[in-house]
């Protein structure tokens, strides 16, 4: 269960979107994440790259780590390695991960915290499970997102943001049934704590079993939904979306791009998702990232 949680009935609510006057985004593509081994041998599920990057721009990569219950001695991390020209955003839902980099940034990312590393002109970093997780084992679940930098910012000084779980903006669905965490960007005038060079929205939603969640969405942003756990449908056409699958939205049912997303959790959820359907919702201004090169090394 995610560490950052709250009673939705006590939170600010998203607006109720009118059914007939909202341009609802349609689902253009569904991708199943592929499994890869990273670092010292830990498994990730990666929905992109693997799709046309122009659909995901400026997002370059999404790695889903876990959820996994490690036994003693099983948890692994990465060795020191370089990055340049983009940002890595590490969000730990359950468990903990340690980060250090050559700017002196870093620390323990744990239970709902996010660490935002802007590699920009160049940086080296290392990511490792803490000693107590290696020794004793335990639950680990997180994601790492790579965000391309606009051409003009690729050579700025590296920077580091430590976003604690308490910093995340919490919102409720219009009917109070579901919880939305705004990590970065703005949703219905509510801003997340992440400071970005590229305008993006980065959300984590827990949609209550059987509930419907509608999100107002910027017309000039693309939109993707990735399932962390559980099952549900996306779009008014109700395209099924289960754990490890990514939906890429296209235009609306009318001409032009849409300004609303709709998600619905299945009535029956797996035991591990008894509290609801866990999804990431991503979007960015499609004109913001002008350079396609990652600067990865």
Image (cartoon, grey):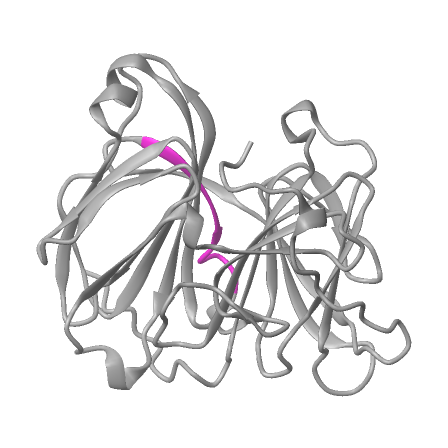
Image vertical order of residue 199 relative to residue 136, above or below: below
Q: Count of labels shown? A: 0
Residue 46 in the magenta stretch? The answer is yes
Residue shown at 16% from the left, 53% from the top = 105
Image vertical order of residue 203 relative to residue 120, above or below: above
Residue 276 in the magenta stretch? The answer is no
Residue 42: give x, y in percent of width and height. Answer: 33, 31
**Residue 155 is drawn in which quadrant?**
bottom left
Image vertical order of residue 241 relative to residue 28, above or below: above
Residue shown at 62% from the left, 78% from the top = 218
In screen coordinates, is 271 left or right of 160? right
Residue 177: give x, y in percent of width and height. Answer: 76, 47
Image vertical order of residue 93 relative to residue 284, above or below: above
* Quarter of the N terminus within the rendering: top right
* Quarter of the C terminus within the rendering: bottom left
Q: Which residues are magenta?
A: 42-51
Residue shown at 80% from the left, 31% from the top = 268
Q: Nearer the viewer, residue 97 or 233?
A: 97
In screen coordinates, is 164 left or right of 275? left
In screen coordinates, is 133 left or right of 104? right
């Amino acid at each position: 269960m995610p560490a950052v949680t709250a009673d939705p009935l006590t939170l600010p609510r998203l607006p109720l979107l009118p059914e007939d006057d909202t341009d609802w985004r349609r689902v253009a593509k569904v991708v199943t994440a592929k499994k890869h081994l990273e670092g010292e041998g830990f498994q990730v599920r990666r929905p992109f790259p693997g799709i046309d990057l122009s659909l995901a721009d400026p997002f370059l990569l999404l790695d889903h780590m876990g959820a996994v219950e490690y036994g003693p001695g099983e948890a692994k991390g990465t060795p020191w390695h370089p990055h340049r020209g983009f940002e890595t955003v590490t969000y730990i839902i359950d468990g903990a991960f340690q980060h250090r980099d050559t700017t002196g940034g870093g620390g323990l990312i744990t239970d709902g915290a996010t660490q935002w590393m802007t590699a920009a002109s160049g940086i080296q970093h290392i990511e490792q499970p803490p000693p107590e997780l290696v020794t004793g084992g335990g639950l680990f679940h997180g994601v790492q997102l790579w965000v391309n930098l606009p051409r003009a910012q690729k050579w700025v000084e590296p920077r580091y943001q430590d976003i604690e779980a308490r910093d995340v903006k919490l919102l409720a669905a219009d009917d109070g049934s579901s919880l939305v965490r705004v990590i970065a960007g703005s949703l219905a005038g509510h801003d997340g704590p992440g400071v970005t060079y590229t305008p993006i929205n980065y959300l984590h939603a827990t949609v209550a079993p059987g509930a419907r969640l509608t999100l107002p969405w910027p017309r000039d942003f693309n939109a993707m939904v990735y399932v962390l756990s559980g099952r549900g449908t996306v779009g008014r056409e109700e395209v099924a979306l289960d754990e490890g699958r990514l939906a890429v939205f296209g235009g609306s049912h009318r001409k032009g791009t849409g300004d609303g997303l709709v998600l619905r959790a299945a009535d029956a959820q797996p035991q591990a998702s008894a509290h609801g359907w866990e999804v990431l919702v991503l979007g960015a201004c499609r004109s913001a990232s002008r350079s396609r090169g990652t600067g990865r090394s």
